[in-house]
Image (tube, coloured by chain):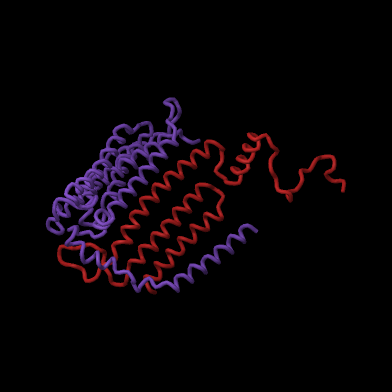
Chain colours: A red, B purple
């Protein structure tokens, strides 16, 4: 099997797993790690876009020049992207720590509920609920109908 | 239902990406920038590692902005984290094996980090990679002895000096009327340690800055109250 194709499939797989993790998971740290996976997939895609069959790494060796070398520009770009990714990852994890301290949970659904409660309390209005949400069952008319 | 919708979305996205792959011709390079740099850089910059010549010479300004982004992220993280009160509990002690191992690793990691920084213009590696290894060298002992602290003042001082040195070298090039961050000091012999002009100096500044930043950030994170 073609090696480049394997790399392309790997990059696409990493991107898909990352997006899937962002969409599907409810835990904040899992979402952050999904972003990291997505990032590495994008980096891999950029990197293999500079690679062609038979090209060497863009480094001049003492014993002579390689016949053809890979494009150094995407590699430099990926270096930048990795460093910025580390910064984003660190900042996101620190923010998650603060959220955990403030709301006591990292589950985004519970977090949203508590945030809405806080907003409603601060504003002095009743909690907004969906018009299709089931009405709260009171004990006196629960089973009569 | 939600999972089904998400799965449907992902399948659609996969089809879309596959379609883009088929349409795009990654192989037939329409831009010959990379080949031009490959042929010109050894004579213009004199660094054996052409990626370094792109990072520090052709795109030096981008690297400066990248450093400032990393600095912003590290500063913001430091501002968000609170200091631990001295009385609160720490993580349990690392034990003898971890302590002895961290002591053994410390000089090794420092030497490897400095080696990788100084050879960034010759071999794969450079300031960012070596800086991370330097940060690890100072962070591993903290993991083994959770009560200890790095002195944040020294870290900030080192970080600031390294960043200032990077900008200063860039400004020095402007005295002669050249552009900001033009490599100075002559090219030297291709492939020797003292070559590529001011690029190794720039990479040393980058390495120290990245190392100090990451070590400070990790030390901040490890100084949080221990979770139950």
Image quadrant occupied by the N terminus of chain B: bottom right
Q: Residue at x 33, y 61 (%)?
A: A74
Asked if A130 appears above or below A1 in the picture, the reply is above
Q: Is residue B86 left or right of residue B51?
A: right
Q: Residue at x 39, y 74 (%)?
A: A1
Asked if A7 appears above or below A39 in the picture, the reply is below
The residue positioned farthest toward the right in the image shown: A144
Q: Nearer the viewer, residue B173 or A20?
A: B173
Q: Is residue A137 left or right of residue B77?
A: right
Residue B143 in sight in this render: no
Q: Is residue B72 left or right of residue A96?
A: left
Residue B26 in the image: state x and y as whole percent: 38, 70
Residue B173 in sight in this render: yes
Residue A113 in the image: state x and y as whole percent: 63, 42
Residue B89 in the image: state x and y as whole percent: 45, 29
Q: Residue at x 39, y 49 (%)?
A: A86
The residue positioned farthest toward the top in the image shown: B87
Image label count: 0
Q: Nearer the viewer, residue B203 or B109?
A: B203
Q: Residue A90 is drawn in which quadrant?
A: top left
Q: Residue at x 22, y 59 (%)?
A: B49
The residue positioned farthest toward the left in the image shown: B189
Residue B109 in the image: state x and y as whole percent: 26, 45
């Amino acid at each position: 099997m073609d090696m480049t194709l394997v790399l392309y499939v790997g990059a696409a797989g990493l991107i898909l797993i990352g997006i899937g993790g962002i969409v599907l998971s409810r835990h904040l740290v899992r979402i952050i790690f999904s972003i990291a996976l997505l990032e590495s997939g994008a980096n891999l895609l950029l990197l293999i876009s500079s690679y062609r069959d038979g090209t060497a790494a863009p480094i001049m060796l003492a014993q002579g020049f390689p016949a053809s070398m890979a494009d150094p520009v995407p590699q430099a770009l990926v270096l930048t992207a990795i460093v910025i990714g580390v910064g984003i990852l660190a900042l996101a994890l620190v923010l998650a720590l603060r959220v955990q301290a403030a709301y006591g949970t990292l589950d985004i659904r519970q977090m949203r509920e508590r945030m809405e409660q806080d907003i409603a309390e601060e504003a002095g209005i009743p909690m907004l609920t969906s018009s299709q949400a089931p009405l709260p069952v009171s004990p006196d008319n629960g089973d009569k109908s | 239902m939600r999972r089904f919708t998400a799965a449907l979305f992902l399948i659609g996205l996969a089809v879309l990406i596959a379609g883009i792959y088929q349409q795009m011709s990654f192989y037939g390079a329409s831009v010959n920038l990379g080949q031009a740099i490959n042929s010109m850089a050894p004579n213009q910059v004199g660094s054996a590692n052409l990626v370094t010549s792109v990072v520090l010479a052709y795109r030096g300004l981008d690297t400066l902005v990248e450093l400032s982004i990393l600095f912003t992220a590290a500063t913001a993280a430091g501002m968000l984290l609170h200091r631990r009160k001295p009385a609160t509990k720490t993580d349990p002690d690392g034990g003898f094996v971890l302590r002895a191992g961290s002591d053994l690793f410390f000089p090794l990691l420092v030497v490897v980090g400095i080696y990788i920084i100084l050879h960034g213009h010759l071999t794969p590696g450079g300031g960012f990679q070596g800086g991370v290894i330097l940060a690890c060298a100072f962070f591993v002992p903290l993991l083994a002895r959770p009560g200890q602290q790095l002195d944040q003042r020294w870290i900030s001082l080192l970080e600031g000096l390294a960043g200032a040195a990077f900008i200063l070298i860039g400004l020095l090039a402007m005295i002669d009327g050249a552009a900001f961050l033009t490599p100075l000091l002559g090219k030297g012999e291709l492939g020797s340690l003292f070559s590529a002009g001011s690029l190794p100096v720039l990479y040393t500044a980058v390495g120290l800055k990245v190392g100090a930043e990451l070590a400070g950030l990790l030390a901040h994170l490890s100084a949080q109250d221990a979770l139950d």
